Amino acid sequence: MASDFHTHICHPGKMELVNGGKGSAPLWSLPFHPWETLQMPDVESEELELCTALGEIGFDKFRGALPYPHEQLELFRQFLALADKFNKPVVVHAVGSSEHLLKCAGEFPKLRFLIHGFSKHNPLLLQELLKQRFFVSLHPSLVQEEKIRSFLKNSPRCRVGLETDNDEALVIEELYAQMDIPGFEDSADSHFREFLRI
Ligand SMILES: [Zn+2]
């Protein structure tokens, strides 16, 4: 079904998790993006119960509303604690040290994490994240990246999927078709469901 792991645009009838899509999409995440979020907002518990996931949340060393790393990571931890309390998976925007990411995730062993927009041409880092129980959604620019493709060809059933993010020109079915790896789309569908427990 060509699952779109993270999009900002609602495409009716598709299997997708819509960032901020409350009221318009069946599966939606509640975003507190590190570019914009200065502090823990007052969030209604009803909203936290209704959402499918929390995110984007995370950190960004180039463009955070708060200084990186300490203040951003402190706020990130507060959102992780909130997700943990309401038993919601999290969609993570992580630009910065993967050490920070691994450390924060280690503090919340029950949480399910999706690293969205993975854009590094680095199959070893991808492999390391997968080993650490993360789900990973690839940036569209990696669909034709040879090193990542050959890694996925050898392990087509790992916890990896694709996303259109906020690009209106992208069509998720076309991204899976361009990837063209036998079994990959079916595997992504089942990991999408596993991540969201749907
Ligand atoms: Zn996004």
Image (spheres, rainbow, N blue to C red):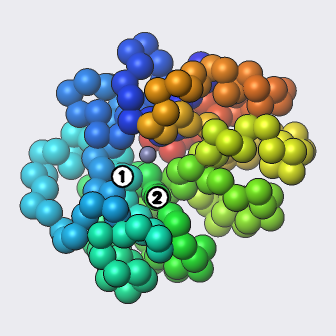
Q: Alpha-carbon distance for marks 2 and 1?
A: 8 Å
Task: Tell me if mark 2 has few (under 14), some (14-19) or many (20+) residues whose alpha carbon lies within 10 angstroms of its own.
Answer: many
Q: Amino acid at mark 1?
A: Gly
**Does residue 121 sit above or below 144 in this rendering?**
below
**Does residue 37 sit above or below 149 in this rendering?**
below
Q: How many marks?
A: 2
Q: Which residue is mark 1?
A: 55
Asked if the residue under mark 1 is in contact with the one under mark 2, i.e. CB atoms within 8 Å, the reply is: yes
Picture residue at 66% right of the left edge, 21% below the top: 174
Secondary structure under the numbered disc 2 in the rendered image: strand
Task: Tell me if mark 1 has few (under 14), some (14-19) or many (20+) residues whose alpha carbon lies within 10 angstroms of its own.
Answer: many
Secondary structure under the numbered disc 1 in the rendered image: strand
Picture residue at 36% right of the left edge, 52% below the top: 55
Q: Amino acid at mark 2?
A: His
Q: Is mark 2 within 8 Å of ligand 1?
A: yes
In the rendered image, residue 58, in percent from the top left (x then y), is placed at 41, 64
Tell me if I can see residue 169 in this picture.
yes
In the displayed structure image, the side of residue 81 where residue 144 appears, left or right = right
- Position of the N terminus by quadrant: top right
Q: Nearer the viewer, mark 2 or mark 1?
A: 2
Which quarter of the figure has residue 196?
A: top left
Q: Nearer the viewer, residue 187 or 39?
A: 39
Q: Which mark is residue 93?
A: 2
Q: Nearer the viewer, residue 184 or 66?
A: 66
In the rendered image, residue 139, in percent from the top left (x then y), is placed at 62, 45
Picture residue at 47% right of the left edge, 18% below the top: 14
In the rendered image, residue 40, in percent from the top left (x then y), is placed at 18, 68
In the rendered image, residue 102, in percent from the top left (x then y), is placed at 56, 74
Which quarter of the figure has residue 75?
A: bottom left
Picture residue at 38% right of the left edge, 86% below the top: 70
* Residue most extreme to the bottom: 70
